[in-house]
Amino acid sequence: MFFIISLLIGLFSFFEYQLSNIFKLRVFLLLIIAIIFFILFGYNSYSPDLENYKIHYDNFDQEYIKLRVEPAILILMKLSQYYGLNFQGYQILFAFLTLSFFIYSIFKYSPLPIFVLFNFYFIPFFPDITQIRFFLGFSIFLYSLIYYQNNKLIYYLLFILSSMCHISLSILILFPFFRNLKFFKSQLSSNVIILTLSILIMTIQKSAIAPLVFLFSDKHDLYLESNDQTQIGTLILFIPFFIINNIIIVLDKKYSWRFESILEKKYLLNLKLLVDLIRFSNFVILFQLFVRDFSRINYNLYVITIIYFTYLIYYYKKKSKLIANFLIVFVILYNLLLYYIQFYMLNNFQYYKIIKETYLSNYLF
């Protein structure tokens, strides 16, 4: 089922690319893909954390649940129960809200949104099905970027809302600060700082950083028990994202000025912002080595990397279809390599059994 759906999304992505001038058809194809994502997400009947979400929903007014679940999610659960929704109905509502924000944002930012969703299907749709609170929060954050340039008030209100869905997203409050640092736009300086600090962080005793971790959230105390091997693994899993992000930064220096004659203004408006988010995602490893939950941010900001590649593909489709086709193949193969490294290689290939069961367990089929 997992691979059948991936082939279907890949086929629709091909039609989107070939028929990019037919706007209504592209929107229709995107709507079908959105329905597929909605069914997989909203009607999911198994995931590693699903039983916990059921417990949260059934006992949302208990004090121990209030301490573990963010306020926006508690409000959503309370409203759902007020209107008589059972857990399945709550799941469907949750999926509708999440995918509405997420897919609209992809459509807004990318000339090839189905291609973005095709890659997203492998990385990181499965973790997002498993970690639904974070997925909703990230979707709201992605949507908030629409207002970053022209209406900072709406942006920050939406950002606060996203952090109230999952506390890990609060680390993104540092993005505007990092963006104003002198070294941030220097690729060499940033990479040296990231790699040097990563090595230094791995030498710090866990007990020395305990107060900082508890200040962020006391539920992350288990990460203080992680050993050096775990941190090395975290760094190794981060490297493929680090590499592809650096490729984008290099390409942006070379090609971004050429986009002005090809890309529509709505894409150009957010171009620099998206590239800076790609830069920032490399710095997240510095926080991820303390709290592994921040890996979710790396996974999801990778979507912006794919969006940027669609600009290059769209540009070269008009200039050289051979290069455009090469970029498509490169992105897909690299994405599958990431999928292989992140999931197939983990725990001696046992992780894929969980993925398979998650995608085969659905109320509708």
Image (cartoon, rainbow, N blue to C red):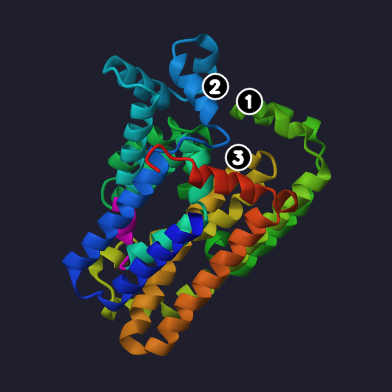
Task: Name the one closer to the observer, 250 or 109.
Answer: 109
Q: Is residue 105 magenta?
A: yes
Percent position of residue 110, x then y: 33, 64
Point out which mark residue 219 bears: 1
Q: Are marks 2 and 1 in contact (CB under 8 Å)?
A: yes
Residue located at (51% from left, 32% from top): 167
Label whose residue precedes the other's in the sequence (2 or 1): 2
Q: Which residue is mark 2?
A: 68
Point out which mark residue 320 bears: none
Task: Name the one closer to the observer, 319 or 49.
Answer: 49
What range is drawn magenta here? Answer: 103-111
Q: Are marks 1 and 3 in contact (CB under 8 Å)?
A: no
Q: Which residue is mark 3?
A: 293
Q: Amino acid at mark 3?
A: Asp
Q: Quadrant of residue 362?
A: top left
Residue located at (69% from left, 63% from top): 192
Label whose residue precedes the other's in the sequence (1 or 3): 1
Q: Residue furthest front?
A: 365
Q: Is residue 120 magenta?
A: no
